Amino acid sequence: MVTILRRVIRRGFAGLFAAALAAMAPMVAAQQALTPHGSFGSWYGHGLAVGDGFAAIGTGSSGGFVDVYRRDGGGWQFETSLLPTDSNAFGYRVALGGGWLAVANRNISASGWPNYIDLFRRDGGNWTFRQRVAMPFSSANSAGYVEKLVVSADALVASTLNIAVEGEIASIRTYAFDFVDGSWGTAQLLQPPYTANFFGESLALSGDLLAVSTWRDRVGPSTGAVSLFRRSGTAWTHVTVVTSPTPAQLDVGASIALCGNRLAVLAQPLPEQPGPVQNRVLTYTGSGPVWSSEGAPLLSPTASPNPQYDSFGKRLACSDSALAMMDSQAGKAAVSLTGPRTVQTLSVALPSHSPGDSIAVHGGDVLVADYMGPLGPPNAMPGIVFAFNGAIDAIFAHGFD
């Protein structure tokens, strides 16, 4: 296990949980616990994003707020809370990049639940609201409910759910907005060169390269696929598609991560797969139409006793040198992308429901959210984010013992 020598607990952290951390100090790998500053909302960490030296943590309930933290030499320092301008569910999806903070919110009081994205810009040390963009609303996209969200200096991409009358997901569509002449333009529908009804189950953006996945659709002989798009000006062009390795016995694309020229993809066994088969994470390198496998897949060091409930890889996040992924209920995992590929487990500080509901990587830090935890008295704390500050650096320095 990675040994982290220094812990930083945010000032104001509830006494009950501070005491629990102190009691467990010899076993704690998480240096810092980030807890809510806002006065209302719950499911803290349902929205989690990092970028430009900041972390945004949002809620998943009505009302809601987004806490913004800044990374400095002492860890993650609270900077501000952003509050909704109306009664929408604010912060259940967030994205950071290129000086922008994008916050999804849902107008639950209006027919059809039309969904919006509020764009904040960092100006003079403050986060200033700049623009609201509306997700398309039509019979083919009845909810406009944002499923995934990514942003950069001049690109905003969101996938939305179409909810059927019975409540199940009927389809997923992906839209891109470009920042032109000082404002975000209208939504442009992105489509792959194959039939896909659930296009946008996971998104990843790196520079002008965008990865969009589907794992419910059949793409040729493969179940699921990842499409790569490249942007030139305001035009997005489909470059290539990554599908299941031959023979196509895996369900690919439920989660993806893209950092520079490296792509990570979750591959799950198909329901009819004979015998117990673990989830695995496949990694590829490329830039244009050719993406090459980097070899052996990454597997959890603690195989699930029931592959049907295997959580390994169901959340992915990366930097240029490291990959973090969801693993068992007890902890999360990280792996070097430049050194040995042994998967290292990171254990959270407190008894929690499901740490890793959302994860993010910033430099050498790994952030994991448990938006229903930690365990404790009812409503004692509506979610928590664990920051493993320097965990990746410690892995590089001390190996994977």
Image (cartoon, rainbow, N blue to C red):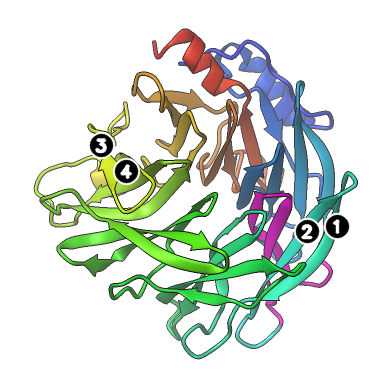
Q: For mark 3, does the 10 Å Cα neighbourhood hold few (<14), some (14 to 19), or many (20 or more) residues? A: few
Pick the quarter of the image with the C terminus: top left
Which residue is denoted by mark 3 in the rendering? 305
Helix, strand or loop at mark 4: loop
**Which residue is denoted by mark 1 in the rendering?**
128
| Residue located at (90% from left, 46% from top) | 124
Which mark sits nearer the N-terminus, 1 or 4?
1
Q: Nearer the viewer, mark 1 or mark 4?
A: 1
As measured in the structure, the alpha-carbon distance from the residue carrying label 3 to the one carrying label 1 is 48 Å
Question: Quadrant of residue 15 in the image?
Answer: top right
Q: Looking at the image, is mark 3 or mark 2 earlier in the sequence?
A: 2
Viewer-side label of 4, 3: 4
Front: mark 3 or 1: 1
Question: Which amino acid, by three-letter code, is at mark 3?
Answer: Pro
Q: Residue at x 69, y 31 (%)?
A: 33
Where does the image place residue 326, in percent across and percent down from the top left? 44, 39
The amino acid pointed to by label 4 is Asp
Query: Hey, which residue is sitting farthest bottom in the picture?
Result: 139
The answer to whether mark 1 and mark 2 are in CB contact below 8 A is: yes
User: Mark 3 and 2 residues: CB-CB less than 8 Å, in contact?
Assistant: no
Q: Which residue is mark 4?
A: 310
Q: Amino acid at mark 2?
A: Phe
Name the quarter where the N terminus is drawn: top left
Q: Position of residue 153 (x, y in %)?
A: 67, 54
Highlighted range, magenta: 84-109
Q: Is label 2 in contact with label 4 (beta carbons under 8 Å)? A: no
Specify which label sits upstream in the sequence, 3 or 1: 1
Q: In the depicted view, which residue is nearer to us: 173 or 65? A: 173
- Work out whether residue 41 or residue 163 is closer to the camera in this orientation and state it: 163
